[in-house]
Image: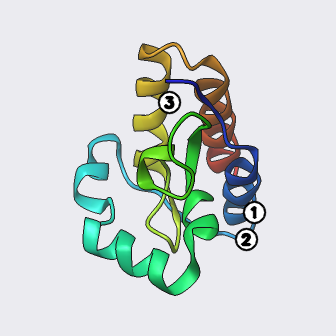
Amino acid sequence: MAVKLNRKALTHARKLIESGKVERDVRDDWSEHAPSTDEENAFIEKHGFADFAEWYLGRDDEGSDGTKGSVSFPFGDFKKIHRCAVISLESRAGQHGHDDIRDAAKKLLELMDSD
């Protein structure tokens, strides 16, 4: 799998932080705060896959374009960026050798925490 940093999503995440759309939750909250499959599908139906992909820091160019399998490392609930999601994805990206995604997540956390 050739997962790379999704730069459009990184820009989107920064804009969310700059506009104050941040959920300052704790590390283990993401399992409870992550959107359900039904919520994901509803978002795609209403806004399209391109907008959906902007909520994922990972992009797999080898995956079928326009499918959920082509994106990874979610950071929010389609309304706000969640601190717990960014902590989780930073850890998982590091474990799987996706250093560019790990480093981007680290910078997002620093930006969130500087407010």
Q: Position of residue 97 (x, y in %)?
A: 52, 13
Q: Amino acid at mark 3?
A: Glu
Is residue 83 found left or right of 53 in the rendered image? left
Q: Secondary structure at mark 3?
A: helix
Q: Is residue 2 above or below residue 15?
A: above
The crowding category of the residue bearing disc 1, from other C-alpha atoms within 10 Å (few below 14, some 14 to 19, many at least 20), is few
Label 2 packing within 10 angstroms: few (<14), some (14-19), many (20+): few
The answer for how far apart the CA atoms under marks 1 and 3 are is: 19 Å
Q: Is residue 113 left or right of residue 94?
A: right
Residue type beneath disc 1? Lys
Q: Residue furthest bottom?
A: 46
Which percent across, then down, holds residue 47?
57, 81
Residue 32 quadrant? bottom left
Q: Find residue 113 and name its label.
A: none
Q: What number is the disc on residue 15?
A: 1
Is residue 27 visible to the viewer in this orientation of the structure?
yes
The residue sitting at 47% across, 75% down in the picture is 44
Q: Which residue is mark 2?
A: 19
Secondary element at image label 2? loop
* Labels 1 and 2 touching (C-beta < 8 A): yes
At label 2, the amino acid type is Ser
Q: Is residue 95 above or below residue 38?
A: above
Q: Which label was assigned to residue 90? A: 3
- Left or right of 97? Residue 7 is right
Where residue 9 appears, as percent x and y from the top left, is: 67, 52
Per the model, the C-alpha gap separating discs 1 and 2 is 6 Å
Q: Earlier in the sequence, mark 3 or mark 2?
A: 2
Q: Residue at x 46, y 82 (%)?
A: 45
| Element assignment for label 1 | helix
